[in-house]
Image (tube, rainbow, N blue to C red):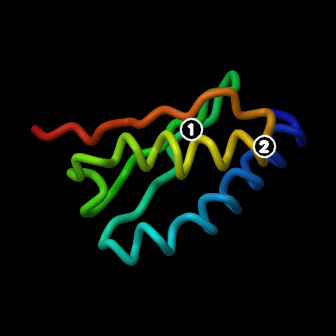
Amino acid sequence: MNTEYFNTINKIKLELDKIRPKLIADDGDIEFINFKDGILKLRFKGECATCELSHITMKYAIEKNIKEKIPEVKKVSEVKLKIV
């Protein structure tokens, strides 16, 4: 891992921190999972994890915003919480 990679991770986390208050206001949250090969993996938490509209939030509120501000991110994908 190089400095550029860690700088990208920091930029991603800063952007997530800007988005997070809106999710928390709806009793949800988002968790950074991984960033590799241009793909950012995130997990919804709380109410967002079970919301029927979470895919819209992911696509238009999170992915669009992050890709516009951080060109290193090519795709944002959701990691679903496995229920055992």
The mark nearer the N terminus, 2 or 1, is: 1
Quadrant where the N terminus lies?
top right
Residue 15 placed where, x, y %? 68, 59
* Residue 82 falls left or right of residue 33: left
* Residue 11 falls left or right of residue 4: left
Q: Quadrant of residue 78?
A: top left
Question: Which amino acid does the dot numbered 2 rest on?
Answer: Ile
* Residue 27 falls left or right of residue 60: left
| Total numbered labels | 2
* Residue drawn 48% across the image and 32% down it: 77
What crowding class fits label 1: few (fewer than 14 Cα within 10 Å), some (14-19), or many (20 or more)?
A: few
Residue, disc 2: 70
Secondary element at tag 2 = loop
Secondary element at tag 1 = strand
Q: Nearer the viewer, residue 84 or 23?
A: 23
* Residue drawn 49% across the image and 39% down it: 59
Question: Which amino acid does the dot numbered 1 rest on?
Answer: Asn
Considering only vertical position in the picture, is 59 above or below 45?
A: above
**Label 2 to label 1, Cα distance in Å?**
15 Å
Residue 16 placed where, x, y %? 60, 59
Residue 8 placed where, x, y %? 79, 44
Residue, disc 1: 34
* Residue drawn 27% across the image and 63% down it: 46
Considering only vertical position in the picture, is 70 above or below 48?
A: above
